[in-house]
Image: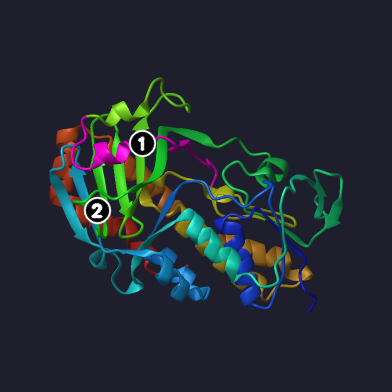
Amino acid sequence: MAELRILIVGAGIAGLSLARALEARGMSADVVERDGELRSAGAGLYLPANAVRVLNRLGLGEQLAGRARPVTRQRMLDHRGRILAQIPLSRIWGEVGDCRAISRSELHALLCSSLVATPIRLATAVTGISTEGTVTFAGGEQQTYDLVVGADGVNSAVRRTVFSLAAPRFLGQVCWRFIAEQTSGNAGSTDWTVRLGSRGRTFLTVPLTHDLVYCYADINSAYPVPPAGDWRTLFADFAGPVRSLLEQAEGAYFAPLTEIVDVTDWVRPHVVLIGDAAHACSPSMAQGGAMALEDALVLADLLSTASPESLSTALAAYQARRRDRIEWVIEQNHRRDRTRNLPSPVRNLTLRFGAERLVRANHAPLHGAP
């Protein structure tokens, strides 16, 4: 059977995971990245058990365990630090496995180091893709591939060039992400902890190491730009370690939160989208990275038995296999965002008496393999 010629556009988590999965199946791909260096913005990453399961299947479980910190419990607090719910994650995920947290740069380095024979070309932007699979690069070079995989994120050039779909939709939220030193009272924690304020304000902490914590803050906003002044004053009434953590947030990474409106249209002749390029969504479920990892695994499985002649069948099977799972995650994101934006007394009462039931229901369909 003739080997597929595959180009992966984007050397982020989705693209590198696919390259790793293809290598594990004896296949090869070219990887191009438009940036001049490999970068991984976003500070930290919480890996729910279904994401860890994929990394285990990619043969990276031992390395992950050495670099990532276990996360054993979810805690939900109000902005004053009063407990609304505490949920052992073993009650959410059961036999699926452990949850972990890792810096994006560490996960990126782990995926890069796992590649043996996959070339990565930096500063190489894609400017055109024909219906026959001929790719035009920014310098004018052209090459023809059986398959071009758009793994180039929410602002995907592949999606914009080939699919001509609407731009990502702004979700009415903006966020800041940074890594800080743990406070003395919180060092050694293995808790995912969210603090919920009024008007949609959220401050999340997830431990990365004994000494470092990933911090994520977001607010509701009418515009996808930073508010005037020092954003940290918006969380001045939050109790606990928030104030001391915010003192370390001078260089926090800012981003508006967006989603892809049509999350079921990822395939064209010779082209497929994966990860955020296909289905960027709200971070409420912390499933963006997990869905990208699952995409890579499923697509590699299907491509491993495909030929150039049967490629369209494999791509249709990929889209069909992923559609329901992605749509579920998107809907659960919306439900969780609606709950978060309830009036504070109603939201707090809902979480005190129903948080575990709600979280278990959110994740139940993700227990099965992708």
- Is residue 356 in sight in this rendering? yes
> Which of the 4 quarters of the picture holds residue 349?
top left
Q: Quadrant of residue 117?
A: bottom right
- Which quadrant of the figure contains the N terminus? bottom right
* Residue 147 drawn above or below residue 260: below
Left or right for 109, reference 239: right
Give the residue type that dot 1 points to: Asp
Instruction: Say above or below: 125 vs 149.
Output: above
Q: Is residue 312 above or below residue 132?
A: below
Q: Residue furthest top?
A: 228
| Residue corresponding to mark 2 | 358
Badge 1 element: strand
- Counting from the top left corner in percent of width and height, residue 31 is at 70, 59
Residue hosting label 1? 218
Crowding at dot 2, Cα within 10 Å, few <14 / some 14-19 / many 20+, comes out as some
Specify start and end residues of the magenta stretch as a single range.
237-263
Answer with left or right where residue 58 lies relative to residue 69: right
Q: Is 259 part of what is drawn in magenta?
A: yes
The secondary element bearing badge 2 is classed as: helix
**Foreground pick, 259 / 255:** 255
